[in-house]
Amino acid sequence: MAETQVDDEDFAQILAATRDFVRERVVPREVEIMDGDAIPDDLRREAAGMGLFGYAIPQEWGGLGLNLRQDVELAMEFGYTSLSFRSMFGTNNGIAGQVLVGYGADEQRERWLARIASGEVVASFALTEPGAGSNPAGLRTSATRDGDDWVIDGSKRFITNAPTADLFVVFARTRPADDSGPGIAVFLVPADAPGVEVGPKDRKMGQEGAWTADVILTGVRVPSSALVGGSEDVGYTAAMASLSRGRVHIAALAVGSARRALDESVAYAATATQGGRAIGDFQLVQAHLADMQTDVLAGEALVRECARKHHSGEDRRIAPSAAKLFCAEMAGRVTDTAVQIHGGAGYMRDVPVERIYRDVRLLRLYDGTSEIQRLIIGGRLIRQARR
């Protein structure tokens, strides 16, 4: 079935509604989200009603069907507020949902995708392990065939939405890597399956309200129909493709967060005084703001160009890593400067730039660290030159 596209006019309405929702409904409740370490139920219901749990799921499977070029425009709006808000539905649309969209069998899509898109089911991407983070090749969770079933054993770490997940998209090794492939498969494991245990909620530096936890799988038995795509070798390819798209999305989130930090800093500099003058009248403060604005504009342009290249198929390897590397590092610079402009006030817990500073620190770590992105970019450039 051909994928239905959302035209520019309809998307403009979706984007405007999302922007209004973020700024009018979520931004005023950021302190409540932070202090309560939870997204309020009414915001969750409203987000689901707007289709945000399935905006990137194709329409034939119950979602809005936005492509990556449209996805990043929404992501820049999501980045403008507490990143935990986006995290609530991020895995449904992103790294977990896209595995099913791209690689699932029709019966797997029919069983899960409509419920993922509506928010009835929270899907969680279970790849990272204590000894295998940014590089999935080090995976140790095992899946062993037993008759018509698979038995999965292993542990996963820092799994987003694990405490509330209904479905785990679990990556496991079925054999050692060999000439025919890396031997990594991906399985659909219901959260209530016997042998699935979710650890205590992690206590993190930031992103309060985005819940992560360890997931331990002990003798978890699933039928052969749980093997995504019906193939033992889909897993690594699915993980890499899902992460590639996800990296462009994370880059866009970083831009949104940097834009918010800049806006907060401009507003503060225009009104806060030192020695009877607004601090925004001082040239050193203006220079900081100029650097921040330049960084944000560069990030916006890079995200849009890399999303275009990913969508067209022109570059799904170097460009996503370059976007994530630059934008995640840029957000760190911009938010650090934002705290500096605010002075002592920027170190206070209920001031937005303090929270943003902590929230964006994670962007340089997940979906592949900045170091891994550099290795991907540099290694691929050399391989291309040798061809």
Image (cartoon, rainbow, N blue to C red):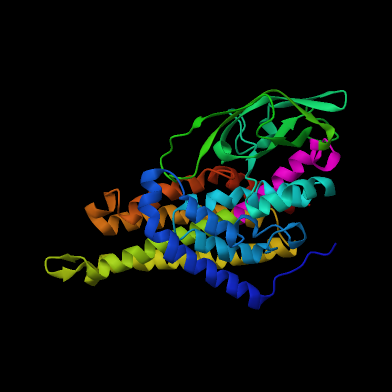
Q: Please provide percent x and percent y for residue 178.
A: 82, 30
Q: How many marks?
A: 0
Q: Nearer the viewer, residue 325 or 2?
A: 2
The quadrant where residue 179 appears: top right
Left or right of 76 on screen, residue 31: left
Q: Nearer the viewer, residue 152 or 267?
A: 152
**Is the residue 62 above or below the residue 140 in the image?**
below
Q: Please provide percent x and percent y for residue 261.
A: 38, 60
Q: Could one spot residue 94 in this view of the protein?
A: no
Q: Please provide percent x and percent y for residue 92.
A: 64, 50
Residue 8 in the magenta stretch? The answer is no
Q: Where is the N terminus found, in terms of image quarters?
A: bottom right
Residue 227 in the magenta stretch? The answer is yes
Residue at 83% x, 27% y is 149
Q: Could one spot residue 334 in this view of the protein?
A: yes
Q: Please provide percent x and percent y for residue 116.
A: 67, 50
**Is the residue 386 above or below the residue 76 in the image?**
above
**Is the residue 46 above or below the residue 175 in the image?**
below
Residue at 37% x, 60% y is 28
**Is the residue 196 above or below the residue 249 in the image?**
above
- For the stretch drawn in magenta, what is the main secondary structure? helix
Residue at 77% x, 46% y is 111
Span colored in magenta: 226-248
